[in-house]
Image: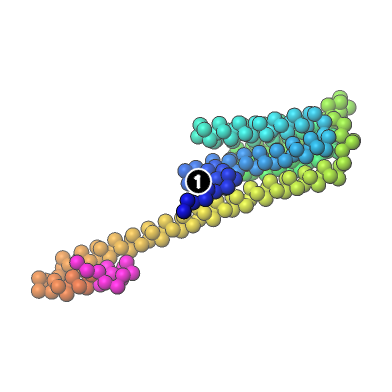
Amino acid sequence: MKKKSDPWFEAVLQKYIFSDKLPPDARLLNTIYLVGLISALLTLIVRTLAGNNIYIILIVSAIFIFVFVMMLMSNLLGSYAVFRWIVLTLICDVFFPGAFFALGGIKSSVMGYFILSIVLVFFLTWGRSRIIFLIIHLALLVLCYYLSSQPFFSRFIQDNSGINIYFDNIFTIIVVGLCIGFILIVQNRIYIIEKKKADSAGKELEQRNKLLEVVNETAEMLLSSDTDDLGKALLAAMDLMSRAVDADHIYI
């Protein structure tokens, strides 16, 4: 009977996230890509139906196209470190601040997406670079709120008074919560898979070391035995080796 093919979404997860051929940083970045694509597409549909202004529609569309292109290029070229910084910089420091002004500034629901951007910084950076990027990003967020309170920059804030603010906030909470939750679930599954592989490799190495010790002990037993006692020594060596490999008997 012909084996039924996997659903396309499971195939995508296996290829871009759970594949053993991918390094850990590639799996993490691909997780962010898939979460970004799904959330951007959902946001684009909902905000279009809600009648949001054209600027936020264009920003969300640009995020979807950008993430899709970055995913293709990084996996095609096999280069993840460079694209990781490109994605972080443009998503967190360009697109999200732009959405802040397009959705109404301080009265908008972009605060949830700013929280998501901070989570992405912690996921995709480490060491000293994390501290530097996080400081720059937080300073940019403070600057966005400061500029929105200034009369000169208030002209760039779009009027979204016709949008239901309660629905907007609830939708943002759902999207951001699901994004963070899905990332955590996938990373936890990757950790469990890698831990099982490490445990299995450790047990195999322990078994090999034990067998090597038995072989050395057997060789020493045979070499040190007299000719008359060689038969007994050989039987004892076979018994020792059978116990080492959990077998009833070993025959020559």
Q: Residue at x 50, y 56 (%)?
A: 195
- Residue 63 in view here: yes
Q: Residue at x 80, y 31 (%)?
A: 102
Q: Residue at x 75, y 38 (%)?
A: 45
What range is drawn magenta here?
239-252
Q: Residue 53, how many percent across, how many down?
A: 82, 31
Return the residue at label 1.
Answer: 19
Q: Is residue 187 above or below residue 110?
A: below
The answer to if 14 sits in the magenta stretch is no
Say whether residue 59 is left or right of residue 240: right
The answer to if 249 sits in the magenta stretch is yes
Label 1 Cα crowd, 10 Å radius (few <14 / some 14-19 / many 20+): some
**Mark 1, secondary structure of its residue:** loop
Residue 159, located in which quarter of the rendered image?
top right
Q: Residue 147, how many percent across, how many down?
A: 82, 30
Q: Residue 75, how many percent across, how many down?
A: 53, 35
